[in-house]
Image (cartoon, rainbow, N blue to C red):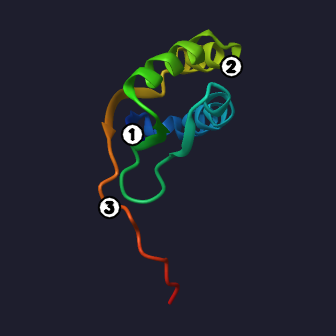
Amino acid sequence: MTITCFIRYEIDPFKRDAFEEYSRNWGQAIPRAGVDLIGYFAPYEGSATTAYGVYNVDSLAAYEAYRTRLAASPEGRANYEFARRERFILKEDRMFLKRASTPHAEWVRP
C-alpha cells in the first residue's frame, strides 16, 4: 500500500520566491532520492502563508530510508542549508495519509 506524505508549511509571505526556489530544488533532489514526488505548491490566492509538499512512499520504513538518502545527498544538504540560512519556513507539519477513494471513475471533461 502506498502512503502519501503531506507537508504543510507556514512560510514568510515576503519570501515566497525563496520558497519557490526551495521547491524547485526538491523537484530535482526528491525523485533522485527514490520517492514519487507529486509536487510542491506555493500560495496563489487566499492564504499568503500556507504552502504544501506532497509525495508518495511505499511505507514508513521506506520514508525513513528516503530521508537518510536525501540528507546525505549534496542536493539535499544544500537545500536544507538554503532554508536554514534564508529562514522563509516558519513552521512545518507532516502527516501520512492513505488514499480512500479508489477506484476512480474516468474523468469526463465538460
Q: Residue at x 49, y 77 (%)?
A: 107
In the rendered view, does 61 fall on the left or right side of 65? left
Secondary structure, mark 3, is loop
**Label 2, on which residue?**
75
Residue at (50, 17) in percent of width and height: 65
SS label for mark 2 = helix
Residue drawn at x 45%, y 24% as measured from the top left? 63
Disc 1 + disc 3, Cβ < 8 Å: no
Q: CA distance from mark 2 to mark 1?
A: 24 Å
Position of the N terminus, as image quadrant, is top left
68 to 32, vertically: above or below:
above
Which badge, 2 or 1, comes first in the chain's sequence? 1
Q: CA distance from mark 2 to mark 3?
A: 35 Å
Considering only order in the chain, which callout, 3 or 2, is on the residue closer to the N terminus?
2
Tag 2 near tag 1, CB within 8 Å: no
- 61, 38: nearer the viewer: 61
Residue type pointed to by label 1: Ile
Residue 36's spot in the image, x, y percent?
56, 39
Residue 11 lies in quadrant: top left
Residue 94, how many percent across, how many down? 34, 31
Q: Which residue is mark 3?
A: 101
